[in-house]
Amino acid sequence: MSTAMASDPNASNRLLENALIRICKLTDRQVQEIISTQRENNESFIEAAKHLGYATETDVERALASCRRIALVEKKALSPSEQLRLLHDPYNEHSEKVRALRTELLLRPDIAGRANAIAVLSPGAGEGRSLLAAELAISFAQLGQSTLLIDADFRHPRQQILFGSDSTKGLSQAIASSGSTHMQAVEGLPHLSVLTTGEIPPSPLEYLSDGRFGLLLDDLSHRYDHIVVDTPPAGATSDALAIATLVGRVLILGRANHTPYKATREMMRRLAASRSQVLGAVLNRY
C-alpha cells in the first residue's frame, strides 16, 4: 500500500472492497445488492457482504492480507543464463518444442479472472524440471502477457542460478509474513517477474503446507496472466505434492533413459490424492 493510499481512508476501503470482490468472485448483481444493503442499513461494504452471506470472516482476512502485501520489483534486473536456449537460441529445435508446448497449454485455460497457474513436477533430480519451468515462463512472457516464475524448491533451488540472482529475499519471506513480496525483473523480458526462494526455511514442507502460502498464491493468481511454479523432486519429499494441491494444475516431466517408469508411476499414484489436474506429460530428450 503506498503512502498516499495509506493516508486516504476512502482509497484503502476501495482497495479492500475490490480485494473482497475478487476473492469471493462476486458478480455485478451481487455487488449491487451489497451496495443497496450497505445504504439501507448504514453499514460498511464488508459488513453488508457478510450480512447477505456473500463473504465470511475468513474471506475478509484474506482480503486484508492481500491489501497489506506489496509486490516490490527490485531495481537490478536479472541476467538470464546461456542455459536458457529459448532466449539465446530461439530458432533451434528445443526452442520450437517449448513454444509448441506453450501453445498446447494455452488451449487449456484455467478459471476466468485467474492466472493460468502450472506447477512443473518430476520424480527425481537431473530431469530438467527447473529449466523447463524457466523456459515455459519465458515463452508466456514473450507473448506480452504478465508472467510470474516462482521457485518453490527449498531443497535445491535452481532459478537463482539460471537467472543470476543473489537476492536473499523471496518466497520464504513472502510466506512468513503478509508484507512485501520481492519480485525480480529480467533483462529483455519486461513481462516476466521471478520470485526466487529467498532464505531456505528449516522445515520446507511446513512452509509449503502453511495456509499463508495458499493465500499468497491466490493473491498472485489475480495479478498475473500466467504463473509457473518450479518444485523439488516429487519422489524425495512431499513438498511437490503440497505445491500441486495448492496450484491445482500440473505438468509432468520425465527424462529419456533417466527417469524410472516405477518412479513416475508412484508419483502419479501419490499425485492422485492431491486432486490436481494433470495437463500433460513431457519427455525430455536433452
Image: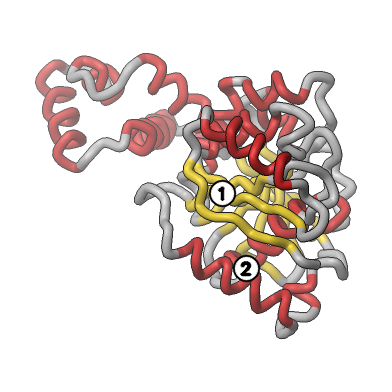
**Of marks 2 and 1, the one in the foreground:** 1
Tag 2 residue:
139
Mark 2 surroundings within 10 Å by alpha-carbon count, few (fewer than 14), some (14 through 19), many (20 or more): many
Q: How is the image coloured?
A: secondary structure
Q: Dot 1: what SS?
A: strand
Mark 1 surroundings within 10 Å by alpha-carbon count, few (fewer than 14), some (14 through 19), many (20 or more): many
What residue is at 59 percent from the left and 51 percent from the top? 251
Task: Name the spot of residue 152 as percent of width and height, x first.
Answer: 71, 38
Does residue 146 appear anywhere in the picture?
yes
Q: Residue 3's mark? A: none
Q: Is residue 6 left or right of residue 142?
A: left
Q: Dot 2: what SS?
A: helix
Q: Is residue 70 left or right of residue 206?
A: left
Q: Which quadrant does the N terminus fall into?
A: top right
What residue is at 63 percent from the left and 22 percent from the top? 209
Does residue 10 appear anywhere in the picture?
no
The amino acid on which the numbered mark 1 sits, given as a three-letter code, is: Ile
Q: Residue 118's mark? A: 1
**Cα distance in 3D space between marks 2 and 1:** 13 Å
268 w.r.t. 164: above or below: above
What residue is at 84 percent from the left and 32 percent from the top? 199
Q: Is residue 91 left or right of residue 55?
A: right
Task: Name the spot of residue 116 as percent of width and height, x first.
Answer: 48, 52
Front residue (pair 42, 18)? 18
The amino acid on which the numbered mark 2 sits, given as a three-letter code, is: Ser
Q: Quadrant of residue 270?
A: top right
